[in-house]
Amino acid sequence: MPRNIEIKARIDSVDAVLPRVLAVADHPAQIIDQDDTFFAAAHGRLKLRVLGDGHSELIHYHRPDVGEAKASDYVRVPVADPQGLRQALERAWGPRSEEHTSELQSP
């Protein structure tokens, strides 16, 4: 099962940090627009992610609620009809929350 490490940090300015990040990255930064809708799950977390480029996926993952770096294991499933799936999941469980983000990602 795939895993990742998530680290969230507050910064005062993207412009101040970006040159340092780009200096160690192996390709340019990219902005990723996404809408995530979170649903209640008996085990772990479940979200429907709709990306700005039109791709969508349902993601189930386990991640601890801790303040430091945290490991997640996850399953991603491509979704052809995200609006239909969102409607079905909302009818079944109700939405937990919705979040729109634009993330600056630099590998």
Image: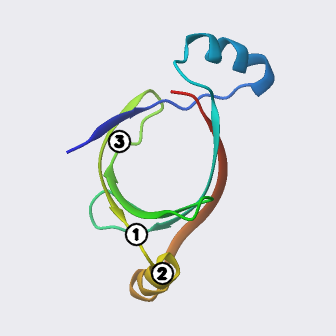
Q: Amino acid at mark 1?
A: Ala
Residue at image mark 2 = 94
Residue 64, disc: 3
Q: Which structural element holds mark 2? A: loop
**Residue at image coords 35%, 42%:** 64
**Residue at image coords 48%, 75%:** 82
Q: Amino acid at mark 3?
A: Pro
The answer, for residue 13, to whether it is visible in the render is no
Find the distance from the CA under tag 1 to the CA under tag 3: 16 Å
Circle 1: is it few (<14), some (14-19), or many (20+) Cα within 10 Å?
A: some
Find the distance from the CA under tag 2 to the CA under tag 3: 23 Å
In the visual, does 37 lie left or right of 100? left
Residue at image mark 1 = 40
Residue 21, position in %: x, y? 62, 17
Q: Which structural element holds mark 3? A: loop
**Is residue 82 shown above or below 64?**
below
Relative depth, front residue between 94 and 56: 56
In the visual, does 11 lie left or right of 48? right
Q: Amino acid at mark 2?
A: Gly
Residue 78, position in %: x, y? 37, 65
Sequence-earlier tag: 2 or 3:
3
Sequence-earlier tag: 1 or 3:
1
In the visual, does 58 lie left or right of 16? left
Q: Which structural element holds mark 1? A: loop
Circle 3: is it few (<14), some (14-19), or many (20+) Cα within 10 Å?
A: few
Residue 68, position in %: x, y? 45, 27
Figure coloring: rainbow
Sequence-earlier tag: 1 or 2:
1
Please state, as top left, top right, bottom left or bottom right, where the N terminus lies in the image.
top left
Residue 7, disc: none
